[in-house]
Amino acid sequence: MPDLFLKLFGICLFGCLAACSSNNEQFKEFDLKPISIYKIPGWASDDFSEVLPALTKSCQNPKSDWKDFCQGLNFQDFQGSSKKVKRYLEKNLDAYLVLSDGREEGTFTGYYEASLKGSSQKDDIYQTPIYGMPTDLVRLDLKNFHVQSDKQQLIGRVENGQMIPYFKRMDFEQMQAPVLLWVDDPVDAFILHIQGSGRIETEKGIIHVGYAGNNGHEFIGIGSIMAKEGLLEPGKASMPHIRKWLKKNPEKAKLLMDQNPRFIFFRILPESDGPIGAAGVSLTPQRSIAVDTKYIPLHTPIFLNTTDPDGSKIQKLVVAQDIGTAIKGSIRADFFWGYGEEAFQKAGRMKSKGSYYLLWPKGKTPPAS
């Protein structure tokens, strides 16, 4: 009798484990659940005329799946008409709820275009340099040497016939790099390095600068540096609070900022209506996002369902036009707020939960994990 009981128990346990394993296997790191486009939360209330410029930019050189859609996207005819854009989207696109391991909730942060005051000449006011790419920086592509490594390349400089790590942030004065512009505030310049792009108001007008490269050292967030020093009060770890503290304590600020060895080099961008994203087009405030391209292809329309840092709903159509080193995951995005103080305040405090919906041309196969 005991043997029979054990056999029956074993069979039941095996069946249970098999069933559990089967249920777990249906969940993917990235999955798309078809949904009626009309059932997307906030779909009926969005002003789709605001996303038209972003859609048009991403349609400049469309991939094969998007050629028919882009050919029919008439900017002149649709301009200023939310209804026309909305009807066109509903007629030509299918909607998919993005899931990760069976869950639809992810994290949404914000970023902005840093805004600084600068000059082409160094003087008593403008003393902080914005550097272009150094002439002595060397990139070593490991694949050319058949080296197995998580890193694709090494960055350094040559000294006495040997390649050594490039200068850290604290040694920036030794860098053999051209000065593109001079700005009036080292803290604002530091934040520009974090954002990767910005607009600088100069005597010659507004000049946009964008990311050109880095010195190869790891990035250490200023928030974690200040927290380790016990300088951040509870609830005051956002970038606006950090910036205020750094500007109020300039001598200590330099020591703290130097603890982040990563240094960013810039390039002057062509005239545009905004910073250039990884997709190669200028970003549209509150209609462009940065994504993880492992899951979401650039130029893909995405409908957000999240909140801003003050709790107000963000339910609107945006376009994936940028990437970010911290943007990793299948339900993860950085919302581009634009430029100026208001954009800085919103972006610096945003860390919201929410979901999003991928839109893809009807009759075409959407991306899969």
Image (cartoon, rainbow, N blue to C red):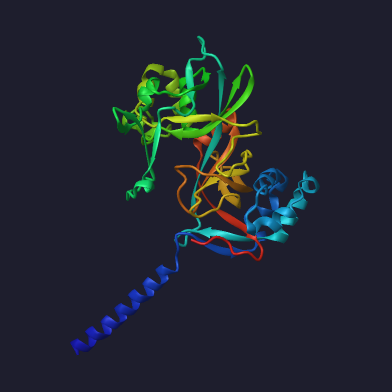
Q: How many marks?
A: 0
Vertical side of 107 occupied by 232: above or below:
above
Residue drawn 40% across the image and 68% down it: 24
How far across and how far down the image is residue 35, in percent? 61, 63
Quarter-of-image position of residue 113: top right
Q: Quadrant of the N terminus?
A: bottom left
User: Between 271 and 155, which is closer to the camera in this rendering?
Assistant: 155
Residue sitting farthest toward the front = 161
Vertical side of 355 occupied by 218: above or below:
above
Residue sitting farthest toward the left = 2
How far across and how far down the image is residue 277, in percent? 57, 40
Residue drawn 45% across the image and 26% down it: 190
Residue sitting farthest toward the bottom = 1
In this rendering, does residue 330 appear at all? yes
Residue sitting farthest toward the right = 77
How far across and how far down the image is residue 306, in percent? 56, 48
User: Between 100 and 231, which is closer to the camera in this rendering?
Assistant: 100
User: Between 285 and 351, which is closer to the camera in this rendering?
Assistant: 285
